[in-house]
Image (cartoon, rainbow, N blue to C red):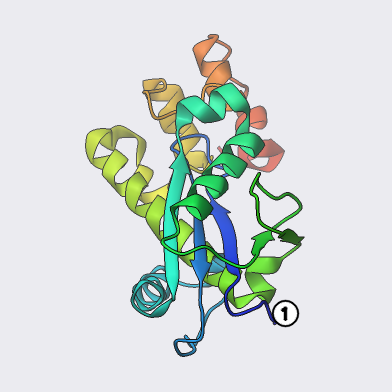
Amino acid sequence: MLRAPADACGVDEAGRGPIAGPVFAAAVILGRAGRIAGLADSKTLSEGRREALAEAIRRRAAAWAVASASVEEIDRLNILQATLLAMQRAIEALPVAPTEVWVDGLHVPRVSLRARAVVAGDASVRAISAASILAKTARDAEMVRLAQRHPQYGFERHKGYPTREHLEALARHGPCEAYRRSFAPVRAVLEGRLPRQAALFGDEGAGSR
C-alpha cells in the first residue's frame, strides 16, 4: 500500500461502465482514528464484505462524503466528465477540508487542492480503497431502488452493466429514463437498430444460442 497523508482524502468512482443509472463517487479522509482492517479494491470484495466495510468506514473515518452525477449529466457531458463532476461534488461535500486529494485512475477533478492521480489506487492507497467501497455500495443501493421502479430490467442483479440478461431485457422492453442514451446499446435500441446477436454478446455468445 502507498501511504497517503493521514489528512488527505482518497477519491474513487463506481459506475462508469454500466449503460444505466448515475455514476457515483466518494471521498474519504481516514485520519488517525484507528485502522480499518480489510480495505481493498471494492471489485475484489464480496457484497457482504463491502457492506460491512462501508459501515466501518462511515463510523470510523475522520470524514467521508458520497455524491453522484445523473444520467442526464452523463449524456450531456460524457461519462469521463460526469465522473469527474461526481468526484468534485464528493470532495466539496466533505465536512472538513483535506490537505490534498488522491484519486484513483488517470484523471483528477477540478479542485483548489493539490491533487494526485494514482493508477490502480483503489488497490494501493487505503483511503482510495475506502472511497471505492463507499461509492460502490451507494451505487448498488441506487440500482436496487431503480429495480423496484423498473423490475423488468433486473437492475438489482446486474447493477446496470451490459450483461447478456440485461441487453436482452433492454431489447425486449426498450429503455426507460434510467438509461444512458449516449451509450451505444441504448442508442441502437432508440434508433431501431437492434444489434445482431454477435454485436450484443460477442461471437461466442452468439454461437451459444
Answer left or right for 119 relative to 125: right
The reply to whether residue 183 is visible in this rendering is no
Report which residue position mark 1 lands on: 2
Residue type marked 1? Leu
Residue at 53% from the left image edge and 41% from the top image edge = 18
> In the image, 146: left or right of 1?
left
* Location of residue 160 in the rendering, given as x and y in whole percent from the top left corner: 46, 41
Above or below residue 94? Residue 89 is above
| As drawn, 93 above or below 76 | below
Seen in the picture, residue 13 relative to 160 is either above or below; the reply is below
In the picture, which quadrant includes the N terminus? Answer: bottom right
Residue under the image location 43 percent in, 58 percent down? 65
Q: Residue at x 43, y 69 (%)?
A: 63
Q: Position of residue 186 (x, y in %)?
A: 53, 23
Seen in the picture, residue 76 relative to 168 is either above or below; the reply is above
Q: Secondary structure at mark 1?
A: loop
Give the image location of residue 103, x and y in percent.
66, 59
Asked whether residue 195 is in view, the answer is yes
Which quarter shows the C terminus? top right
In the rendered image, which quarter is residue 53 located in?
bottom left
